[in-house]
Image: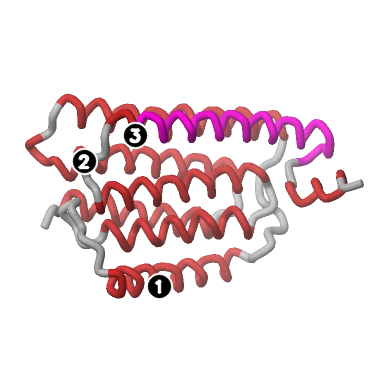
Amino acid sequence: MNQILDTVLVLLILTSFLLLGSSRLATCIRIGAVQGVLVGLLPLAASGTGCTARVVALGALIAGLKGFVFPRLLGRALRESDTNREVEPYVGYAASLFAGVLSLLASFWLDARLRLPAHSGSDLALPVAFFMMMAGLFLIVARRTAVNQVIGYLVLENGIYIFGFGVVRDIPVLVELGVLMDVFVAVFVMGIAIYRINRTFDHIDSDQLTLLKG
């Protein structure tokens, strides 16, 4: 059992719960940055003392994009929108945390039922992946502000990456770079969308986009 890998996975669970329970957007961006760095540490933690240059480069790239570049883009969009917190989410924060607990239990149940082969060196990898995918989808659906929805998209993508990491382990580097490029473009486009929403409606509540219907 890889204790370092298990520690990183547990921290990923905790950061997801913090995102579910936090209303301040700047705090959510910082938590998302920490989660991105933790995801970048996963290949290094799984390899242990057998790290190769490819693993180190991949971990540094993931941590750099998800821990620094993406949060910087979101932070800039947040400053331009002059919004500090999620005021009226579709689902309250206590209910969100309760939904997170149910999602975590459902993730362990789903892992036990599917019995997928885990190659990451930790039995927590697949339950954590399922939980983060559920948490990311929940943030996308249950939050009004575009910033939190983008963070939910990043959490969802982190869960998908952990699932591939847990099942396949040795994903070709071109596939990994392609996924990171897709995420980078998506976050960049979403940052522009947040800016445009703020210019049009003087806030970044995405539910107001329904006013554009003819």
- Which quadrant would residue 192 be assigned to in this image? top right
Residue at 19 percent of width and 51 percent of height? 120
| Pick the front one: 89 or 58 | 58
Mark number for residue 176? Answer: 3
Specify the amino acid type for callout 1: Ala
> Disc 3 on helix, strand or loop?
helix
CB-based contact (under 8 Å), mark 1 and mark 2: no
Mark number for residue 94? Answer: none
Specify the amino acid type for callout 2: Asp
Few, some or many C-alpha atoms within 10 Å of disc 2 (few <14, some 14-19, many ≥20)? Answer: few
Tell which tag, 1 or 3, sits nearer the viewer: 3
Few, some or many C-alpha atoms within 10 Å of disc 3 (few <14, some 14-19, many ≥20)? Answer: some
Image coordinates for residue 12, horizontal then vertical, percent: 35, 52
Mark number for residue 106? Answer: 1
Answer left or right for 9 relative to 186: left
Asked if residue 194 lies in the magenta stretch, the reply is yes
> Disc 1 on helix, strand or loop?
helix
Residue at 72 percent of width and 58 percent of height? 88
